[in-house]
Image (spheres, helix red, strand yellow):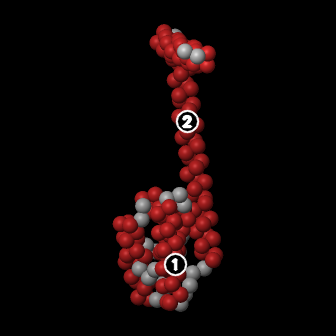
Amino acid sequence: MGPSNFAFTTTFGTIATCLIAYVVYFDYRRRNDPQFRKQLKKDLKKQAKAAKELAEIQVAQQRKAIRVAVEEAKLEGFPTDVEEREGYFMQEIAKGEGLSSDGSASQEAALCFYKALKVYPSPPDLISIYDKTVPKAILDILAEMIAADSSMSVNPLKAELDNEKGLD
């Protein structure tokens, strides 16, 4: 046994012994000290509350980002000519599928699907297709985008009436 091997073994043994001693001490305090137990519970509640607040903040930020993305898409405008709409639809669907397969750009993928939905003549039909093909995380974001757009009609009966009247 060389000097470096001996030093390594001694160091490892010391660290392992200290770790085991701390675990035993912690367990002893947890079992026998009511104040320590109360403090552990209090710390656990604080951590849970902080995690909940952080999650709520993230959801609020995501909703705000979704509203902003929808407004920007509306400001950009959508094609009105039938051929332009078809090309735009195909382009946005392809872009959305590419982004959704990546998985990291859920909001951008949902925005592409939203833009395609916006120019599609029968949104309820396309939504039923999305239900079968689009990942749930992206579908949830898309649902929030649809809810944020007051001008979009996804009611099948209302959409048919609008199409008959020519109110796309």
Q: Nearer the viewer, residue 133 or 157?
A: 133
Work out whether residue 118 can be spotted: no
The quadrant of the picture occupied by the N terminus is top right
* Percent x, y of residue 125: 37, 75
Q: Nearer the viewer, residue 14 or 71?
A: 14
Q: Residue at x 63, y 71 (%)?
A: 72
* Percent x, y of residue 61: 60, 54
Q: Residue at x 53, y 90 (%)?
A: 81
Q: Amino acid at mark 1?
A: Gln
* Percent x, y of residue 87: 51, 84
Q: Nearer the viewer, residue 58 or 107?
A: 107
Question: Residue 105 falls in which quadrant of the image?
Answer: bottom right
Examine the rendered structure and indicate whether residue 115 appears above or below residue 60.
below
Circle 1 Cα neighbour tier, 10 Å, few/some/many (<14 / 14–19 / ≥20): some
Helix, strand or loop at label 2? It is: helix
Write down the residue under mark 1. 91
Q: Residue at x 56, y 46 (%)?
A: 56
Check residue 49 in the rendering and tell me which mark sits there, or answer none.
2
Helix, strand or loop at label 1? It is: helix
Circle 2 Cα neighbour tier, 10 Å, few/some/many (<14 / 14–19 / ≥20): few
Question: Residue 77 falls in which quadrant of the image?
Answer: bottom right
Q: Residue at x 49, y 12 (%)?
A: 24
* Percent x, y of residue 102: 50, 61
Work out whether residue 27 can be spotted: yes
Considering every residue shown, the one lying at the far front of the view is 2
Give the spatial CA distance, label 2 vs label 1: 44 Å
Q: Amino acid at mark 2?
A: Lys
Left or right of 158, for residue 37: right
